[in-house]
Amino acid sequence: MSYGTARGIAPSKPPAHARTPLNRQQIVGFWAAWFGWTLDGMDSVIYALVLGPALTELLPRSNIAATPANIGYVGSLMFGVFLVGWGLSFIWGPIADRFGRTRSLAATVLVYAVFTGAAAFAPNIWLLGLFRFLAGIGVGGEWAMAGTYVAEAWPEDRRKMGAGYLQTGYYFGFFVAAALNYTVGASFGWRAMFLCGLVPVVISIATLLGVKEPERWEQRHREEQAMPVKRHNPLAVIFNRQYIGRTITMSALLTIAIVGLWAGAVYEPTAIVFLSRKAGMAAPDAVKMASYGTGLLSIGTILGCVAAPWLAERVGRRPTLALYYFGMMVTIALAFGWAFYQPTGSALPAFMAVLFFLGLFGGNFAIFSLWLPELFGTEVRGTAFAFCTSVGRFIGAGVNFGLAGAVAVMGTLGTPVALTAVAFAIGLLVIPFARETRGEALPG
C-alpha cells in the first residue's frame, strides 16, 4: 500500500484525455507500415490509370485489335488476374505467424515492387498479366502484415486510431498515383508509370534494417519455442470451434467490401475518361481529369478512414460498418447508375460530385483494420487477417470476369458496375452475425 493510499489520499491519475506515449520503435514501425501501404495503394491504382494506353499498345502486339470493346474486356480480365494473385496472398499469414511481422511485411513490399517494375518491360498482354498476377500476391499481403504489426506494436489505448491512420496510407497512395499519372504518365507514358513502382524496394530494406518485431509476437514466439508440443497449423486453428464463426463472417464482410472497392475505385478512372471524352475533351485532358477524380475520391476516403475508428469506439463496430455499407450501396448506384447516364453537359459534374461521397464511405476498410485483430489471438492473428482479406479477392476476381462479360453484352460500363451495389445490401444482412468487440482489449 502506498503512503498516499494509507493516509486516505487518492493517488494521482493522468488526465482522461492522456494517451500512452509512443516509443521510437513504434513510431518508426508505423511509418514503415504506412509508407508500404501508401505505395501499395499507388501500385493498385497505377494499372487503372494506365489501362487505356497500355492495352492500346500491347493488344496489337498480341494479335488482338485495340478496339474500345477489347480494351474494356481484356482490362477487366487483367483486373481479375490481379485479384487472383491478391487472393493467393493468404500465404503471408502463416509466414508472419511463424517468422515475424516485420520480416513478412518487408517481403510483401519487395514482391509487389519488383513485379510492378517488371511490368514496364512487358512486350505483350500475356507477360503483363503474369507480372500483375505476381505483383498482386505482394500487394494483397501488405495490408494483413501492416495491420497486424500496428495492432500488436501500439499500446492498447492508441491502436484503434492507429488502424485508422494506417488505412489512410492506402488512399494517400491514390494521390501519389494520380500525381504520377498527371506528370510522369502524361509526359513519358505508361511504362514509366510502372517503373515508379520500384520505389517501394527502399521501404522493404528500411523495414528489415530499422524495425523490430512487436514485443507481443516476440513473447508468444519464445513461449512456442519453449513448448515441447507440436505446433498447430494456423490455417486449421482459424477454423476450429472457437474461431470458425468469426472467420466465415469476416471473410464474407470483407468480400463485400472488396467487390465495392473494385467496382467503385478501379473503374472510376475509366468512367471519367469516357465521360470527359464524351464532353469533348482531348485525350490528354481526359487523362488529367481522371487524375483529379482519383484525388477527389482519395480525399473522401482518407476522411472516412480517420472517422471510422472514432465512430466504432462510440457506437460499436457493427453499427459503424452498417453505416458505411449503406453509404456505399447508395453512392455506387448513384455514380454509375444515375450520374454516368446524365446528359452530356451534366454527366461529368454529377459523377464527380458523387465521387467524393463514394470515397468517404469507402473508408470502411479502416474498420476491418481495427476489428480483425480483436477477434483472433496472437498465435493466429496474421493468418486470420491474411485469410479473411484474401478469400474475398477470389470472389472479387470472379465479379471482374462477370463484369467483363456484362460490359461486352450490354455495351456499357455504368449499369454493370452499378449493380454491384446489391452486394452491400447483402452485407447489411450479414453484419448482425459478426461479433461486437467494442471496449475489449486485444487478445493475447
Image (tube, rainbow, N blue to C red):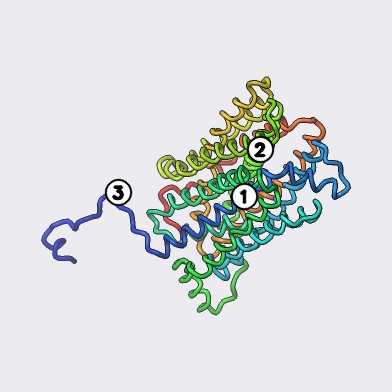
Give the residue type that dot 2 points to: Val
Dot 1 falls on a residue whose secondary structure is helix
Q: Is residue 336 left or right of residue 5?
A: right
Give the residue type that dot 1 points to: Ser
Q: Nearer the viewer, residue 153 or 371?
A: 153
- Residue 160: horizontal and vertical position, in percent? 44, 51
**Label 2 environment density (alpha carbons within 10 Å; few <14, some 14–19, many ≥20):** many
Nearest to N terminus: mark 1 or mark 2:
1
Q: Is residue 64 left or right of residue 131?
A: right
Q: Nearer the viewer, mark 1 or mark 3?
A: 3
Name the mark on residue 287: 2
Query: Compared with residue 32, is residue 255 higher up or lower down, i.e. above or below?
Result: above
Q: Nearer the viewer, residue 341 or 203?
A: 203
Name the residue located 63 percent from the left edge and 29 percent from the top edge: 335
**Label 1 environment density (alpha carbons within 10 Å; few <14, some 14–19, many ≥20):** many
Disc 1 and disc 3 in contact, CB within 8 angstroms: no
Give the residue type that dot 3 points to: His
Q: Nearer the viewer, residue 362 or 320?
A: 362
Dot 2 falls on a residue whose secondary structure is helix
Disc 1 and disc 2 in contact, CB within 8 angstroms: no
Query: Compared with residue 342, is residue 83 higher up or lower down, i.e. above or below?
Result: below
Name the mark on residue 17: 3
- Residue 237: horizontal and vertical position, in percent? 60, 63
Q: Nearer the viewer, mark 1 or mark 2?
A: 2
Nearest to N terminus: mark 2 or mark 3:
3
Look at mark 1 in the image and give the residue it sits on. 251
Name the mark on residue 182: none
Q: Residue furthest left?
A: 7
Q: Nearer the viewer, mark 2 or mark 3?
A: 2
Query: Compared with residue 226, is residue 171 higher up or lower down, i.e. above or below?
Result: above
- Residue 359: horizontal and vertical position, in percent? 55, 37
